[in-house]
Image (spheres, helix red, strand yellow):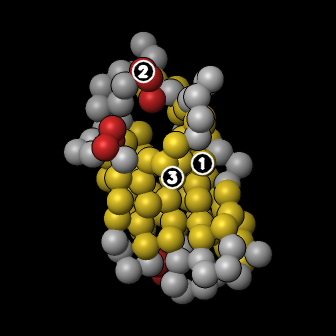
Amino acid sequence: QVQLVESGGGLVQPGGSLKLSCAASGSIFSINTMGWYRQAPGKERELVATITSGYASYYADSVKGRFTISRENAKNTVYLQMNSLKPEETAVYYCYFSDAGNAYWGKGTLVTVSS
C-alpha cells in the first residue's frame, strides 16, 4: 500500500504562484509515475502533470509554460510549481501515484485563486 500526503494548498491571488508537495510512503516500487490532477467545482477531474521515476514529464496543454512538475526520488516526493495562476484554476488538487500494479490518490489539497 502507498499513502500520499499533499501539502501547500491555499489562497493565492490571480497571477501569483504556489508550490504543492506530495510525499509517498509505504510499499514504494522504484519504477513509478507520480503526478497531479485537479477538479474544479462542477467539472470533471483532469490531469495536470505527471512525472516518471525516470524524470519524464507530461503537462496538460492548459498549464504548459506556467507549471513545473519535479520529484526527488530519494524522498519519494513530487512537487508542482504553479506560476501565473488563473481564477479558473481554483480546484482541489490531487496527488497521484501509480506503479505496475496499482494506482493511489491523495486526499487532495484546495487551491483557491482569488483576489
Q: Which residue is mark 1?
A: 94
Q: x, y percentage for residue 91?
A: 55, 32
Quadrant of the frame with the C terminus: top left
| Amino acid type for the residue under numbered disc 3 | Trp
| Amino acid type for the residue under numbered disc 1 | Tyr
| Amino acid type for the residue under numbered disc 2 | Pro
Q: Which residue is mark 3?
A: 36
Q: Relative to 9, is 49 above or below?
A: below
Mark 1 or 2 closer to N-term?
2
Q: CA distance from mark 1 to mark 2?
A: 18 Å
Mark 3 or 2 closer to N-term?
3
Q: x, y percentage for residue 21?
A: 51, 55
Which structural element holds mark 2? helix
Q: Residue at x 41, y 66 (%)?
A: 51
Q: Which residue is mark 2?
A: 87
Q: CB atoms at circles 1 and 2 under 8 Å apart? A: no
Total tally of numbered discs in the picture: 3
Q: Residue at x 42, y 21 (%)?
A: 87
Dividing the picture into quadrants, the one containing residue 58 is: bottom left
Q: CA distance from mark 3 to mark 1?
A: 6 Å
Which structural element holds mark 3? strand
Q: CB atoms at circles 3 and 1 under 8 Å apart? A: yes
